[in-house]
Amino acid sequence: MQKSLTKTLVFQLQPDESGQQLLDDAFLEARCVYNETIRRAKNGDDWDEIRKDLESDADLVNNTAQLVVQKSLEAMENYYEYDDYNQPSHTTDSAYPLRSNYEEGYNLFLEDDCIRYRLSAKPYNPVKGTLCGSPDALEQLRHAIQSDAWRVGTAEAMRRNEKYELHINITHTEADVRDKEDSRMVVGMDINEDCVALAALHEDDIVDSVVIDFPEIKEERHRYFTMRKRMQNNGKSSFDRAFEQQEERFVHDQLHNVSRQVVEWVSQFEKPVIVFEDLKEMRNSIDYGTRMNRRLHSLPFRKLREFITYKAAFQGVPSDKINPEYTSQACSLTECEQTTRANRNKKRFKCVDCGRQDHADRNAAINIAKKGLATLDRNVPALKTLPNVRKLRRQASGCVTQPTVTHDTARGHHADGVAGVSD
């Protein structure tokens, strides 16, 4: 099955002093356009009128002005689509990214040893220079420019950590993604606020399972929430927004690392398909009190799922989804399958009927995989024993991007499921 797949390449811009000033002025103008777009949309103005007025009045090239307005209105549309959640602010004080279409707002030129760019920051005032980035990213971009199977798309110029960057989208228009019906291995995935649990099943038995921890996301989000709350109480809205942007960047980078680990683990199997829970209606059904609702409503389930889905697709791995009903409450052993809320206590799963103990998220991942097999009309194996729980996480310090095992557990060794259970 062929489909279009898009990935983002990040490059550093190194403009001279005049180029930096042009970019800074354009970022501030884009911020004004964004704020005015959101303000008028909140006031109920007609969106077509908003587009017409702001695109013509902005001191930006037409292409960039159109895309800034479009991105702003998309933020409002997303707010309405997801049940009036996370309303965009129209008082943004920081620089706003410049979005441009290839060969309209920006252009790229291949030379023997580099790729040069021309970015229209302001009308009749382009910024020029050479792209700097990793050799792999530069090679991918060079290939995308030259190949008919790839398309260079929109790009965003932005300032991060006092550096200027250009994020370029490239699309593989003829990528091959295997049909999920042709899959031999079903990988159930349970996404939580501090970990991802994975379980690989085929028609004969469970093959492997793992829990990938990322507690730093939960911890940092709580820290940023506390800082923003203090800023709000002291009326310092600009600092509040700055902290919010730092949090967004941190979470975005961490989710990319986690999704990369997940896809690497899944790719070891022959013809896998990743099965997620369909959590589209989850927000409507959550009501656990103010503090817990805030934590669960703000979890980046959707973003992490999107990252995993498109990274897996680039490896030819398809994705699917199932009804999440009772996946976290049911005992995954075939001879039991007792289903009750009393089975789960935080991260510990203890079946009130058969007494089996397990990591609660790993147990849920197995149930998701079993439902995934049933959805594909495959034989669901009779599970009598399960592998020990293996937990992976990045080390707390040092330049480590690969997961490390926190305790000795032999791959494929079947036991009673007690060893490695987390409290």
Image: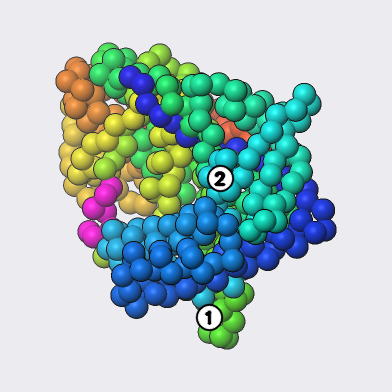
Q: Is residue 228 magenta?
A: no
| Residue 217 in view | no
Numbered range of the magenta stretch: 279-286
Which residue bears the numbered disc 1?
A: 232
Q: For the residue labelled by badge 2, is the local secondary structure a helix, a strand or a loop?
A: loop
Name the outermost residue toward the bottom: 234
Q: Amino acid at mark 1?
A: Gln
Q: Circle 2 sits on which residue? A: 104
Neighbor class of circle 1 (other Cα within 10 Å; few <14, some 14-19, many 20+) is some
Report the residue at 69% width, 33% height from top.
109
Q: Residue sitting at 70 percent across and 29 percent down? A: 110
Residue 285 lies in the magenta-colored region = yes
In this view, the residue in front, 122 or 183, is 122
The quarter of the displayed image where residue 191 is located: top left
* Residue plotted at (54% across, 67% down): 58
Element carrying mark 1: helix
Given residues 225 and 381, the one toward you in this image is 225
